Image (cartoon, rainbow, N blue to C red):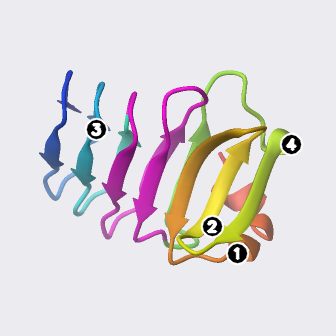
């Protein structure tokens, strides 16, 4: 388990399966290899997913995550308390697919079209 704590952290995970929590602050997390569970924590975080099967936790009211290297059938999202796939809005922006719950931006999935996520909800959101 890797925990960033308070402040702006730069986290590099190893090649194994890791649990990564950024804590508070605008963190940058590199997941690298392995099947990782990633929670950016409180703040607007930048996540670089690795080559394994990564699960990213999306939460409301804590800032948003910019998710890089999303891979269909490899990357999954876990929704935090009070969130349901039924109350998500997903649309295209200049930065990629943006995921909202009401007016709260949860994530920007870089280099990904909203339709990729919308057409695969049951395999992406676990």
Give the mark nearest the N terminus, 2 or 3.
Answer: 3
Q: Which mark is residue 86?
A: 4
Identify the residue at image location x=19%, y=35%: 8
Is disc 2 in contact with disc 3, using a CB cutoff of under 8 Å?
no
**Farthest-out residue, right:** 86
Q: Residues within 10 Å of mark 4 (few under 14, many from 20)?
A: few
What residue is shown with label 1?
Answer: 116
Quarter occupied by residue 44: top left
Instruction: Please tell me whether the stretch drawn in magenta is mainly helix, strand or loop.
Output: loop
Is disc 2 in contact with disc 1, using a CB cutoff of under 8 Å?
yes
Say what secondary structure mark 2 lies in: strand
Is disc 4 in contact with disc 2, using a CB cutoff of under 8 Å?
no
Give the mark nearest the N terminus, 1 or 4.
Answer: 4
What residue is shown with label 3?
Answer: 20
Q: Nearer the viewer, mark 2 or mark 1?
A: 2
Is disc 1 in contact with disc 4, using a CB cutoff of under 8 Å?
no
Question: Which sits in the foreground, 73 or 71?
Answer: 71
Gap in angstroms between the C-alphas marked 2 and 1: 9 Å
Q: Split into 4 quadrants, where in the image is the N terminus?
A: top left
Q: Which residues are magenta?
A: 41-70
Q: Residues within 10 Å of mark 2 (few under 14, many from 20)?
A: many
Identify the residue at image location x=58%, y=26%: 61
Residue 56, position in %: x, y? 47, 46
Q: Nearer the viewer, mark 4 or mark 2?
A: 2
Q: Is residue 110 visible?
A: yes
Identify the residue at image location x=48%, y=35%: 63
* Depicted 44 relative to depicted 113: above or below: above
Q: Tell me: 120 left or right of 4.
A: right
Gap in angstroms between the C-alphas marked 3 and 1: 26 Å
């Amino acid at each position: 388990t890797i925990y960033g704590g308070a402040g702006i952290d730069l986290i590099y995970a190893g090649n194994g399966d890791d649990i990564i929590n950024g804590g508070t602050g605008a963190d940058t997390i590199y997941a690298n290899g392995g099947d990782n569970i990633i929670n950016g924590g409180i703040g607007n975080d930048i996540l670089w997913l690795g080559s394994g099967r990564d699960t990213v936790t999306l939460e409301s009211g804590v800032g948003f995550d910019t998710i890089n290297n999303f891979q269909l059938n490899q990357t999954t999202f876990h929704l935090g308390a009070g969130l349901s796939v039924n109350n998500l809005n997903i649309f295209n922006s200049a930065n990629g697919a943006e995921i909202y719950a009401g007016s709260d931006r949860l994530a920007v999935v870089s280099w990904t079209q909203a339709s990729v996520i919308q057409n695969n909800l049951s395999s992406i959101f676990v």
